[in-house]
Every structure is written in structure tokens, then in C-alpha cells.
Image (cartoon, rainbow, N blue to C red):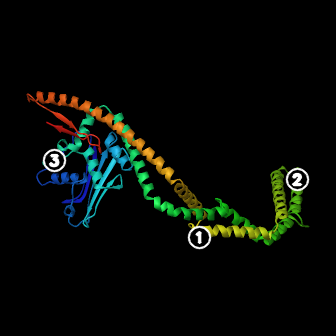
Amino acid sequence: MLKSFEVKDYALIEHISVQFGSGLNIITGETGAGKSILIDAMGLLLGERASTEVVRKGANKSVVEGIFNVEENKKVKNLLEENEIEYFPELILRREISLKGSNRCFANDTPVSLSIVKELGNFLVDLHGQHEHQSLLRTETHINFLDEFGDYDDLMIKYSKTYNELVRAERELNSLKERKEILIEKKEICAFQIKEIDNVSPLEGEEEKLNDELKILENFEKLAELTTEVYQLLYDSENSVHDAIVKVQNNLCELAEIDMSFSESSSEAETIMALVNDISSFVRSYKSKVDLDPAQVEEIRERLGSINLLKKRYGGSLKSVLEHRKKIGEEFALAENFREKISKLSASLNHLKDKAENEAKNISQKRIEVSKKVKIGIENSLKELGISQPEFKTEILNEPTDGKPIKFLS
């Protein structure tokens, strides 16, 4: 269902937006009000030919946009999925015609070809007018009418799924065949790069860890000097913080025995004492472990040098190096197993072709059965309209490339 239609800078229209409700919507107006222009703009949205002459004077481009509710339109959903366009319950179609001659079409903000717009238009809107879209006269739409009479949606969905898988498999196989020579040429390059990266075997987060270690080792003297000074100030000197806190704590305890208001301060002094002891213990332990190992410093520098060399060659960061290693690993494996991959894809493609053919035959058989019911139903309706000997036929033709085209004859 068409929910809204918007036209900008088309012919004489500067801007108009029309909202549609459910049921019958009627647009009226006197001659020259612009009703036919609105219909022409709708035709443009549905894929009719366009020229720069439709752009309103003074504007750079014309834009027509329609929003459709396609929640229950399976044909639209299938068409979108076949062309890898994201499906939503609402479909937004937009077409832009510029003075420069460019003609752009969009479905849900995804650029699409005019042919896809025309296909979508066939499933969305039927314009009835002289020499305009008249779906009853277009043989390519007859198959859709016949399917509407049938009760085989499950078969259609099943076939559509198989067909989409078939298209994807065919694309993958063709892409692989096209890349054959490139893969063979790149195999040696990939092997060299894999060996170069694997000789270093960098790990995620390793560079940051090595830089932290190197910073500590390069500042050995300063660390030793400062930790010694801190420990002496806190604990190992004549007037240490520890000794001062002990005196303060003792005095506060005596004061608390005399006046309870000092109890809280006495407890806080105990906390400070525990904190000083913890810090002193940590600094003493750290100081005892600080050791300068020239060999370790050199080893870390060499390791960082190797990592930096890889970074320069493969993207500028350790992350890009690891991503490149994964990519060339996959390409090398593909080149190594190229024949096997081709064989598997070909077998899968043949299986999907057979499956799609069988499913298509099932649908064709259903269409033949439904066409007989349609014939009886339409002929009976025509008799009720006063046509004494009506004859209605549905012609179903076998075409190997596209199933069974359907044509109504009367």
C-alpha cells in the first residue's frame, strides 16, 4: 500500500507531499490543478523514462519519493533479497533527475538500477490510464495474477530461498575462477610474508607490555634511588614517618582513655599506621626486586625493532600486522586448495541447480492446476455479465531459462 508520495521540483511543482490512508483515496481538482503532473511523477518513480525537461525551472534536480507498506508483499521481499537490498516492512523508493543528466534510483537508501525500480513498481502500483501502466495487458505480470489465485506460497518461498543460494554460489564460483591467476601469482608472495611475520610471531597487546618493561629497565637507577629514599622516609630512618605515627597513636590512645572524644582520632591513627606499614612493605619488596639486566634490555629492544619493522611493512600498527597475517593465511590456503575448492563449489552449484529445477517443476504443476480453476471462474463470471459463450485460456509455455511464462488469452 502506498503510504505517502513526495514530489520536489518536478515540472511546475515546487514541493508537495501527499499522505494516503487505508481504503479509497481520491484527489480532485479543476483542470490545470496539477493532477496529471502528479500521476506523471508517480510514473517516473515507477521507472518510466525521464529527461532533464522535468526539472522545475530554477532548480538543479527533481526528486520523487514514495513510501510503501510491503509487510505482506512477498514478491517485493524476495526481489529485495535477491538483489541484496535490506528489507524493512516499509519500502522507500526515491528517484532523482538532475539538470546534468544524471539519473539515480534508490531503494531503502541503497542505489539500484532502473530495471530493479521497474520490477518493484510492477509489484507496488498499477496505473490505469490511456497508454500507461495497465498490468492486465502486460503479459509479464500475468504470472503474478495466477500465483495470487494459487495456494502454494510455501513452494514459492522454498524456491526463492534455493534460487538465492544458487545465485550466491554461482557468484562465488565465478569470482574464484576469475581470481585463479591472481591467486597463483600471489601464492609465493603470501608464503614469503607469512614466513616473515611468523618468524617474529607478534602477539596482541605484546608491544604495549614490552614498552612498559623497557621503561622500567631503562629507569633502573632512578627507581632504585627513589624507592630507597621513600623507604627511609617511611620506615628506615631516625625520624621516620612510622616512628612519628607510633608516637601520635600512643598519645591519642592515652587521650582517649581520659576523654572519649579522642576515640575516633585514635582509630584513624591506627588506620594510618596500617597504611604506612603496607606502603613500606611494598616499597621494600619492590626495591629488592629492582635489578638491571643489560641482556634483557637488549632483547626487548630487538624484539620491539622486529615488531616495528613489521608495522612499517604491513599497515603501521600491530593490529594491522595481525589482520594482514590472517588475510594472507586465508589467501595462501585458498591457493593451496584451489582445485578442491572449485570442485566443492561446482558440486554444490549442481546440487542447487537440480534442487531449484525440481522445485520449479512443482510450482509449474501447481500453476497448471490453478489455471484450469481460473478458466472456469472467469468464464462463469463472464456469463453472469451476459456473454453467452465466453472462452478464456491460460497459455503456459516452457522456457528452459526461466521456467514457464504465463499468458492470458481471451
N-term-proximal mark, 1 vs 3: 3
Q: Quadrant of residue 98?
A: bottom left
| Residue 348 % position (x, y) | 44, 44
Q: Nearer the viewer, residue 292 or 150?
A: 150
- Circle 1: residue type: Lys
Q: Work out whether residue 65 can be spotted.
A: no
N-term-proximal mark, 1 vs 2: 2
- Circle 3: residue type: Thr
Measured Cα–Cα span from mark 1 to mark 3: 70 Å
Label 2 Cα neighbours within 10 Å, binned few <14 / some 14-19 / many ≥20: many
Secondary element under disc 3, as helix, strand or loop, is: loop
| Residue 153 % position (x, y) | 33, 35
Secondary element under disc 1, as helix, strand or loop, is: helix
| Residue 260 % position (x, y) | 84, 49
Return the residue at label 2. Answer: 253
Q: Quadrant of the N terminus?
A: top left
Return the residue at label 1. Answer: 312
Secondary element under disc 2, as helix, strand or loop, is: helix
Return the residue at label 3. Answer: 28
Q: Nearer the viewer, residue 304 or 68?
A: 304
